[in-house]
Amino acid sequence: MSLSIDPKEFARTAVIANPANASTADEKAMEALELYLSAYRLAEKYERISTTHSTQETSEILQILKDNDAKM
């Protein structure tokens, strides 16, 4: 069975765990915002797939996400 991920908490944790390397405050804010939005969207996609494919394992859901990302 798959895990449930809170998109807001996941995105927040991703930003905290990966501090920006930029030199200016504006650049740091932009990097943090881009990471937050990417992490949030990924967690939303994961949640959407996990609820529509409730019998799949987490590893299968992650593979679906990777396959979908490769198509884009």
Image: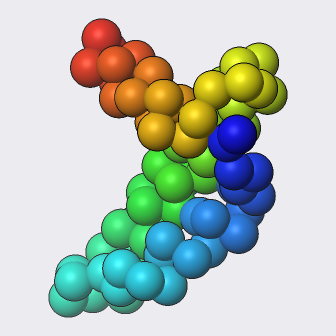
Q: Looking at the picture, how far across and down is residue 8, in whole percent?
A: 72, 62
Q: Tell me the quarter of the image containing the C terminus.
A: top left
Left or right, 45 with reference to 63: right
From what the image shows, is residue 54 above or below residue 31?
above
Colour treatment of the image: rainbow
From what the image shows, is residue 36 above or below residue 50?
below
From what the image shows, is residue 44 above or below residue 26?
above
Which residue does the image show at 76% across and 26% down from the upper left?
Answer: 54
Which residue does the image show at 67% across and 42% down from the upper left?
Answer: 2
From what the image shows, is residue 1 above or below residue 38?
above
Q: Looking at the picture, how far across and down is residue 48, in whole percent?
A: 72, 28
Identify the image quadrant of residue 65.
top left
Q: How many numbered marks appear?
A: 0
Q: Residue 65, can we see it?
A: no
Which residue does the image show at 49% across and 85% down from the upper left?
Answer: 16
Q: Looking at the picture, how far across and down is residue 41, in whole percent?
A: 58, 42
Q: Looking at the picture, how far across and down is residue 70, in whole percent?
A: 26, 20
Left or right, 54 with reference to 62: right
The foreground one among 52 and 16 is: 52
